[in-house]
Amino acid sequence: MTSASTRPLILGITGASGLVYAVRAIKFLLEAEYAIELVASKSTYMVWQAEQNIRMPMEAVQQEHFWRQQAGVDDGKGKLHCHPWGDVGATIASGSFRTVGMLVMPCSMSTVAKLAAGLSSDLLERAADVQLKEGRKLVLVPRETPFSLIHLRNLTRLAEAGARIVPAIPAWYHNPQTVQDLVDFVVARALDQFEMDCVPIQRWQGHLQEVDP
């Protein structure tokens, strides 16, 4: 029997632009010795090729090595189990498989639309649907701009169903110096929803001092 503290987090990765968010999440989670059940959508393979000119392997074991390599984390850190996108019979497709919830990052508007309509055409969508029906945490990090009215209505529908929406919108009060600092802020706020404090960011410290005019 697994305790709440040892249950894995499902990480869903879709074909939205911004795969660096997923890579940084994997890095911090594994370095903090968390367990990850990872499923990448079919579109993710094409986005990797387009954005990074890198071919993402299809086979699960090779894919685990791929993600660890991208995140710069050795095999001995944390637990990472990858699932093929079409394996709808995988463990994470069932509500009887205990997890702390699921994070979809980045989350495409296509995935948002399917989840809002209750459609499960692949393992990622099925796993997300399971979190909603089981009353577990489902956190979506949409990476799109601008949002159309259809996008907003779909996101609202998911929020009403219990999902948490954490847009990929960074802050500047932590004085970011690099693009990576901005990425890590979004990753930290997404993982905050699961009470996983493993990203070293500067958090809000209180009111700013008044500046004389």
Image (cartoon, rainbow, N blue to C red):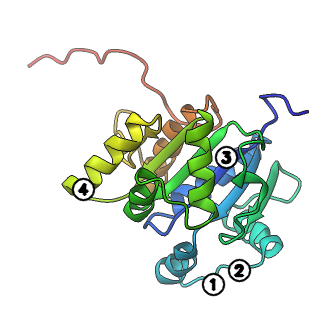
Q: Residue at x 64, y 33 (%)?
A: 196
Mark 1 neighbour density, 10 Å: few (under 14) some (14–19) many (20 or more): few
- Measured Cα–Cα span from mark 1 to mark 2: 6 Å
Cβ atoms at labels 1 and 2 below 8 Å apart: yes
Three-letter code for the amino acid on which mark 1 is drawn: Arg
Three-letter code for the amino acid on which mark 4 is drawn: Ile
Residue to which mark 1 is pinned: 55
Q: Position of residue 68 (x, y in %)?
A: 74, 63
Q: Which mark is residue 20?
A: none
Give the side of residue 181 with respect to residue 152, left or right. Answer: right
Front label number (3 vs 4): 4
Quadrant where the N terminus sits is top right
Residue to which mark 4 is pinned: 150
As drawn, 10 above or below 17 = above
Three-letter code for the amino acid on which mark 3 is drawn: Phe
Q: Residue at x 52, y 81 (%)?
A: 46
Cβ atoms at labels 3 and 2 below 8 Å apart: no
Residue to which mark 2 is pinned: 57
Q: Position of residue 115 (x, y in %)?
A: 46, 54
Task: Residue lying at the far left in this picture: please name it.
Answer: 213
